[in-house]
Structures are given as structure tokens and as C-alpha cells.
Amino acid sequence: MPRRKMMRDFVRALRLVQATDGRQHAHQLVEGLNAAAAEPELEGDQAEAAAARSRDDKGWRDIAEILLTRAPGRLGQLSESACGCFNVLAGASPATFLLGGAYDEDMHGGRIHRDVAGLAFTSPAGYACYLLWKIREEEALDRVKRCPQCQRWFVDETRNKSAARCSAGCTARWWDRSRRRAARAKSRDKRMPRRRRA
């Protein structure tokens, strides 16, 4: 593994080890899921780069499939089959434990070695598995949702975990004229007393 890639993975893992809040891991997972779902913009002859990106994104797409199998009322739990799929994916994506490798600068520009624990992943699928495992461990899995309007993943930041869409813009697009009319008619029916037939 090239040293530069290993250091990049180490820095990424260092950020993970320092993150303690389940929402922080959830945001990192959502960022990866949305990046994998985005269509690449190809210019000229970039077929080889697109193929490499497609291989990298496969792990993220597999994690997305696992998340999509959750039952609507039970977003905090994974099914037995989803757990099996996760275990197969995680088993094929090993991680390496690392110590050290981080440096700070002193006021004179010198490097000070920091003894830090970290993880290096051999593939993006390993990183995605780690994030999903960490979110499940921190019981924040029910905060990771997919917007039914735009199909993007988002983290539900509401206190009672009741957000249905990712943004106010998606809610405005969902709350169109036909839904407003139906809601108005429904409330009108509730207010009007029913007439008795004689």
C-alpha cells in the first residue's frame, strides 16, 4: 500500500477515533452514501477512472441496500438477513490498527510526534462498515434516513427523530397543491357536523 494512501486513511481513521458523538459518525456515513449515489461527471476518456470509482462505491451501495431493508417503524434495527449481508461485507474488508504517525507543530515550526491510535481501511467498504457498526453501537441508526422526495440520505437532527424529509425545500415540494387541498377538505369535513337523516 503506498505510504501516501496509508497516511490519508490514517488521518481519516484518526478523525473517527476522536469523534465520540453518534451523530458525527452518522454524518460521515451519510456523506459517503450520498457521494456514492451521485452520478459522476465524465469528460472525454475517463472510463478507467469511472470504473475505479464504481468499484470503490460498491461498498457504500451495499451499505445503502442494508439500510433500505429496515422496516419503516423500526429504523433502529437491522433484520437478520441484513446483519448477515453486513457480516459478509465486513469480513471481506479488513482494517489495520495503527499507533503513532500523527504530528503537531511547535511554535518554531518543528514537528512533535503524537502517539495516537487509529485504523486504516484497505477499501472504502471497510470504512463504510466501520461507520455503520459504530452508529449501531451508539444506537443512532434510527437517525440515518433517506428522503422520499429527493432520494438523498440525511441525519435526522430533531429531538424526537420525526423528520420525514431532508430539508424545508423537499418538504415544500412534497406539500403541493393537491396535498393542501386534500388536507383542507379533510379539516372541513371534521368541522362540519353530520346531518341526520329523517
Image (spheres, rainbow, N blue to C red):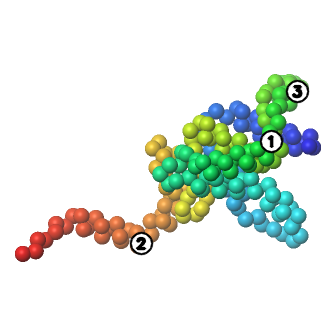
Give the distance between the C-alpha atoms of the residues marked 1 and 2, in whole angstroms. Answer: 51 Å
Residue type indicated by callout 2? Arg
Mark 2 in CB contact with mark 3 (< 8 angstroms)? no
**Numbered circle sitting on residue 177:** 2
Q: Label 3 sits on what residue type?
A: Arg
- Please indicate, yes or no, whether residue 103 appears anywhere in the rendered image: no
Tell me the mark number nearer the camera, choosing from 2 and 3.
Answer: 2
The residue carrying mark 1 is 94
Name the disc covering residue 111, or none: 3
Q: Are marks 3 and 1 in contact (CB under 8 Å)?
A: no
Looking at the rendering, in which quadrant would you find the C terminus?
bottom left
Q: Amino acid at mark 1?
A: Pro
**Residue 60: x percent and y percent?**
71, 53
Determine whether 194 is above or below 134 in the image.
below
The earlier-in-sequence mark between 2 and 3 is: 3
Mark toward the start of the polypeptide (1 vs 2): 1
Kindly report the distance in space between the C-alpha atoms of the residues bearing marks 2 and 3: 62 Å
Instruction: Indicate the position of residue 3 as horizontal and vertical percent values.
Output: 92, 40
Q: At which x and y percent is residue 114? A: 82, 25
Crowd band around label 3 with a 10 angstrom C-alpha radius: few (<14), some (14–19), many (20+): few
Give the number of marks: 3
| Residue shown at 72% from the left, 33% from the top | 17
The relative height of residue 175 versus residue 107 in the rendered view (above or below) is below
Disc 1 secondary structure class = loop
Q: Residue at left 84%, top 69%?
A: 43
Q: Nearer the viewer, mark 1 or mark 2?
A: 1
Q: Residue at coordinates 70% horizontally, 57% vertically from top-left?
A: 61
Residue 124: image tag:
none
Which SS class for mark 3?
strand
CA–CA distance between discs 3 and 1? Answer: 31 Å
Q: Is residue 173 above or below residue 75?
A: below
